[in-house]
Image (cartoon, coloured by chain):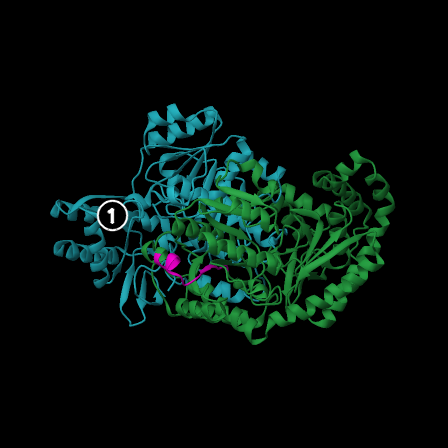
Amino acid sequence: MGLQSLHTIDEGKRTGIYFSDTKGKRYIDCYCGAGMFNLGRHVQELSNTLQEQADKSDQGNFVLISQEKALLASKLLSFIPAKLNGVFFSVGRGEAMDFACKLARGYTGRTQLITVDGAYYGETGFSVSLSDGDKKKFFGQIPDIATIPFGNIQALEERVTTKTAAVITETIQVENACRSASEGFFKIMRKVCDKTGALMVLDETQTGMGRTGKKFAFEHYGVEPDICVIGEALGAGIFPIAATAFTKHVQKFMHAHPLIHLSTFGGHDLGCRVAYAALELYETIKPWENAATVGSKLLEELALLQKQYPGKILSVHGKGLAIAITLRSEDMAQKAVTKLLKEGIFTATGKVARDAIILRPALTITIADAQAIVKGIQKVIKSL
Amino acid sequence: MALWKDALTDNDKKIIFSLFSRHLSKGQTKTMRAAHLDFIETRRKGIGFTDGLFERRVIDCFTSAGCFNVGRGNPEIIKALREALQKYDIGTNLLQSNVKKEFIKKLASIAPGDCNQVIFASGGGDAIDCAIKLARGATGRKKIIAMKKAYHGHTGYSLSANGKDYYRHLFEPLEPNFVFLQFGDLDAVRQVAGPDTAAIILEPVQGEGGIFVGDDYYLKGLRNICNQFGIMLIFDEIQTGFGRTGRMFASQHSGVVPDIMTLAKSISGGLFPNAVVMYRNIPLLTQYVKSNPEFHQSIAGGSDIGCAVGIAVIDYVVKNRLWDNAERMGNSIIEGLLQIQHENPDIIKEIRGKGLMIGVEYTHEYMGALMADSLARHGIFAVYSGNQPQVMRFMVPITITQAEVAKMLDIIRKAIGTMRVYLPLTKPLSKIPLLKKLLDDIHVQIAVFDIVRYFEDILGITKRNYSKEA
């Protein structure tokens, strides 16, 4: 079996906020492919789009100019509420982040990348090197990367210099118990970047496309990044596509160095057609509005649960429908995940904070279903 | 413009070029225009596509560097994709599914030797990063031997293993524990490899490097060195896999079984991204993977839809023994090209390759761009190697028929005729060292040809005089 499968469940039918195993047991999907199924499972409209388009286009030759890439780029850039003008498409998160790092180095002519502690960006070389944890020790570290504490304004002011190519962070560290930083941190980050000429890179893979109650989480903090990483939610779980979007200034590098960074499957013409339809669907549904409403209700009820079990639940954190429940120990969190499965709730622990259960259901979830999740969690916590 | 057109109006074309330049890369638009490679692919079918710009059929000899082995718009693969979409979405990387299991079994059934274990990845670069992590993780060593002119991808570790300066130098420093050796030089490997080496990584046939075929002696020699020191032998079969070189995998020519093998491109059927890392069923690797199940997670790779498509691709390749066709048609093309070389010794220096992975080396570096231009005018899309501009790669879909081969050779012959028009100008110039340097400089070529193209467009002589037939 492919190594990624941590559970022996066979995934069968999927629809809305649910999937069933092949024996017919139904689960509420609170993992959502690490925040990919923002519009729900097996989105019928998009499945239909791909079926219709399958004989009208294909992947295309990645070096060629294509109507699909051109129109999707234009659509995506007008979707993002920031002054970004350039885009490069990838298949997934790591690849999109690795490109962001290369772009920052290439554009600034500087080498230093500053990341924050507690981060997770993906599994490729730059992403591993920037992420928390000891994977980089075993697999190899890209040189000239420094780490500062997430949320520490003083560290930003001291460490970011004219030698810095980019300051890189997720807007909210979903895999690290949905840890967030203050508005002040992001404002100062913007300020020191402007002052030093370093680029501000925000990874919105798990926070973008409506997850936190806004289209993108940076809107909460009144800042705009120079480079924004958009993850798999762009293809809404029907087609793997991710993107790196950037400002007009940064784009000069791409104009001057054509074909210096390539992706065979990134900007796949069929995928662009699906993502285009997905963006239209995002614009129609505006799932960020529901994420804000249901998210705050869910947070509220989970906070009550914490008061009920203060010895087991250490904290409840989150924004919109990216919510983490930190338990007393990693072991307890792992047990909770297993027991929640029995209750028909599929979750995962954080990749960084392994003592936390992360809830990231489809953004289309109703308050009643959210309450069912709380009920399930309550039962499990009580039994631990 | 209305979405997704097959027939493009002049205004549509203007919008596409303008949006592509504005939001993707002005430089890329310029480069493609200058080389007459500003195709807009509309109807994709068989061995080619319609160029929406001039409404003419074009034979695809690049195939996204080997993605369309089963042909473009293959109805059997499209059917499998549509069926998969009735049931599946991408699926959940943390869970299993019947289609994932079936795909893994299918891969094992065609695996070389015991290289039959599977890890999913999202694309070629991601697969290489995974392979490097696996080798380093399992051996506990860091040093990796890679090849000059090698091409493995653009993500962090794969780029660190790339042997081409253009892709690397503006992004350095990269991961430092790579040693680069001349492809084919076994003695160099003997001198560098040792008990501190985690892996030797190479393409059994270098693709972008300029089509260099690793011979049996070399590959077997590498296998022996790896056995001696416990080094992981990694074959990057991303371009060579699934029948391209005349065998299911290029390693099967020599019988050398790699410890780790990366596959991507054609596994997708040209329709849905997917990639895998396969590794040998040996305790060193299987135990590492078992005890580190999260060492390389892929959210979108190994998707349920991608696996269903992958199954259909393998079935199609096996059922039609496409590798046999690749070998036959490859030989036929090489034979034709040798004849053309014989007629044009001042232009073609060497023909090399295996199956339908064929390289034509011209006598001068600047000829790569000139030939791409001439071929485009006559209806072939082919590109020169990024790592070796005087080498042009021909990697047509391996479903190609004898009649299509004849047509392809005919076009190449005509294109050489067209290129001869330029030669009286460029050849004497290329004898002057400084001018030769300028001629060989790709940036100079783009600038010059872009101006030429501009005047051609104004004068209305941007003619692509290839046939209209499909």
Q: Is residue B467 visible?
A: no
Residue at 62% in and 54% down = B207
The spot of residue B285 in percent (x, y) is: 39, 57
Q: Which chain is cyan?
A: A
Magenta stretch: includes residue A190: no
Q: Which residue is farthest bottom?
A: B319
Q: In the rendered image, which quarter is residue A141 located in?
A: top left
Q: Which chain is green?
A: B
User: Horizontal placement of B260 versus B92: left or right?
Assistant: right
The spot of residue B261 in percent (x, y) is: 49, 58
Viewer-side residue, A352 vs B158: B158
At mark 1, the secondary structure is strand
Quarter occupied by the C terminus of chain A? bottom left
Viewer-side residue, B365 vs B67: B365
Viewer-side residue, A248 vs A130: A130
Residue at 24% in and 50% down = A298
Q: Label 1: chain?
A: A
Amino acid at pointer 1: Ala
Quarter occupied by the N terminus of chain A? bottom left
User: Horizontal placement of B15 versus A39: left or right?
Assistant: right
Q: Magenta residues, as a range?
A: B273-287
Circle 1 Cα neighbour tier, 10 Å, few/some/many (<14 / 14–19 / ≥20): many
Q: Is residue B28 visible?
A: yes
The spot of residue B111 in percent (x, y) is: 49, 67
- Measured along the vertical axis of the image, is residue A188 above or below residue B200? above
Viewer-side residue, B34 vs A283: B34
- Measured along the vertical axis of the image, is residue A140 above or below residue B295? above
Which residue lies under the disc numbered 1? A356
